[in-house]
Image: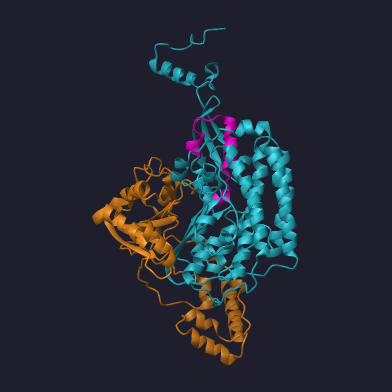
Amino acid sequence: MADITADLDITNEAQLRYIASQAVDARVNIELETDGMTLNIGPQHPATHGTLRIVAKLDGEQVIRSEPIMGYMHRGYEKLSEVRTYPQVTTLINRIDWVGSFANEVPFILAAEDLMEVEAPPRAQWIRTALFELGRIANIMLFLGDMAVQLGGSTAVFYAFRDREFVLNQIEAATGGRFHPNFNRIGGVKDDLPAGWVGETKSAMQSVRDFCDEMEDLVLGNEIFQLRCRGVGVIPADIGMAYGLSGANIRASGVDWDLRRDAESPLAWSELDWKVWTHPDGDSFSRYWVRLQETREATYMVEQLLDGLPAGPIMAKVPRIIKVPAGESYVQTENPLGSMGYYVVSKGELTPFRVKIRTASFSNISITPWLLEGVLVPDIATILASLYFILGDVDR
Amino acid sequence: MSTTETEVDEEAAVEPDVVREAVARAFADELGDAYIEHHIANGRDLWIRIDRSAWVAAATFAKTRLGMVWIDFVSAIDWLPSPFGRDMEAEQDWVVHGRDEAEAEVQQTGVAGGDTRFQMLLRLFSPDENMGVTIKADLPDDDLSIDSLMPVFPGTNWHEREVWEMFGIHINDHPDLRALYLPSGFEGNPLRKDYPLVARRVKPWPGIVDVEAMPEPDEPEDASGEAAAAGSDSAEASSDDESGQDKAAALAARLAALKEKRG
């Protein structure tokens, strides 16, 4: 074997130091060392759930530096909200996280209700909570299948799309829209539940639990999946908090924090018996694991909600023309992707004066430059998939 | 401290929010002259307004001493009343709704006050205490800049870039102040109130084509009584209470006029 140092200028101390530091890392093979290259991922890569572009500077197989570039889907909802009436804004914000749309509407409506000092009747709150959780299930089921396909196991995603239909059908039956329900109104919800919906939803919940069991076996139990996810993309809790991570991403780092349980909300979560799942590891595997448990937990929550559904009206008395009194309100809920909030500033007009939309994915992927530093190229897909973001939720 | 907290739990509905008052006092003690005022929504939320010189100090204090370790967002508000009006503002809308002549609005600011057009917003949250705080800081018009929070919360990186491009507020010592969303070469700061939303200038109010006369649910007497009860409602509301046929006819005439005008 040729002496690999022959070509090197061994008097160059900096170079020798560099080689020594690389050699410490057993994953880097000195013989394959290159000058470094720039790898462009996306904007149309399947791991990006939309149009995120990642420019990674590589040294061999190792990422030195990476930079996510977004804005390909920026639709300017904060500006548009300023010229829409409050009921019209919900149509826009349905499109932020398009696979969990119902949940997008809720914090905005709650903020408006807070300013108007209107409270939706209990039945409306319970229906909202049930649809919120159905939206969560539909959203996370996509992740549960998709994460596997990112790692090369294409079976799971077919099961996910197949079984997600059960949930989407129920959302459609109740709201009229599979993806964009636009079902919340200030003071309640648009309609009552259709006849027979409760029973069908319960059987759909059983199908979802069967799906979860299957995924636990097929994906979590898969040796290759474990090898590619365990210890990959570890996020320590304090760093995750400083980057504003939320939802399952931060719970997978051992932070026991869920706004559904911890925050005071008019929705019915506090009336239910459920558990917040956390995992101490903070790696890609634990993020999948936590989301899987949360999906299963959500099916039990929906069943409890349907069993305990109170009778009564579904709309509070609100004026026909909605003018929200002057004030500021910030309401945040635990959405499928993490914590989502609307900072609504009103001046007593038909339209909001300013709406700051705090989305979960924006903060969740802001950690990627830190997280991708030093990982290997195949792990980029693992990490991006495990962080689970929707580009509509990043770009707004 | 624990005794006061239990008191709050029992009497939150009526008593002042002592926990949030204590947090506000802690900020006041720490920041001294840089602390300006606070506003408490009982049992729900806390706003604090500070001088921008204490921007980083306030964030550091909240993170290290008050347990507010989670960065929620950094943003800004432009308090300028929109020069384009807010409600029914495009030319097409004047045809239908008439033009509102009562312009020349005075700039007003929200809770915890404000003296300037631009105000920074910082939202921090403590998962342990389950309490958030919104910190505001005024920015003088002749020097729109504020220090970067990245040394305290690295997650503010993109939020600050967004503020920079959307409001044109310079972030001091930010390592990478580039456009986040907008294409290169884009001019202007879209979230400023004096930046026109072009689509809005050339199209009628969204949904205006759907405007129909509301069916009158009650007798005309009742409707007028309702209008009287509404009392202080402004011009839009009272014009909406016109009789359905009149309004539909007027609307049709106006739309026809508009079409003719546009050729």
Q: Using the rendered image of the protein, determine whether residue A85 is visible from the camera's viewpoint.
A: no
What residue is at 24 percent from the left and 55 percent from the top? B32
Q: Quadrant of residue A145?
A: top right
Viewer-proximal residue among A251 and B85:
A251
Judged by its main secondary structure, the magenta piece is: helix
Vertical comparison of A150 with B77: above or below = above
Q: Would you say B50 lies left or right of A306 here? A: left
Task: Give the quarter of the figure containing the N terminus of chain B.
Answer: bottom left
Assign the C terminus of chain B to one quadrant of the image: bottom right
Is A395 inside the magenta-drawn segment?
Answer: yes
Percent coordinates x, y for residue A322 in the rendering: 52, 74
In the rendered structure, the colour chosen for chain A is: cyan
* Residue drawn at the location 52% of the way across and 33% of the way down: A56
Residue A249 in the image: state x and y as whole percent: 54, 44
Using residue A190 as the reference point, say whether residue A362 is left or right of it. left
Whole-percent x, y for residue B160 in the image: 41, 48
Reply yes or no: does residue B93 show up in magenta: no
x, y percent for residue A186: 55, 69
Q: What's drawn in magenta, residue-wise?
A: A368-396
- What colour is chain B? orange
Task: Locate residue A88 relative to residue A172 in the image: left or right.
Answer: left
User: Can residue A237 be seen?
Assistant: yes
Which one is nearer the viewer's eye here, A125 or A88?
A125
Q: Residue furthest bottom?
A: B221
Question: Between residues A180 and A292, which one lies in front from this camera angle?
Answer: A292
Q: Residue at x 58, y 48 (%)?
A: A390
Is the image coloured rainbow, by chain, by secondary structure, or in one colour? Answer: by chain
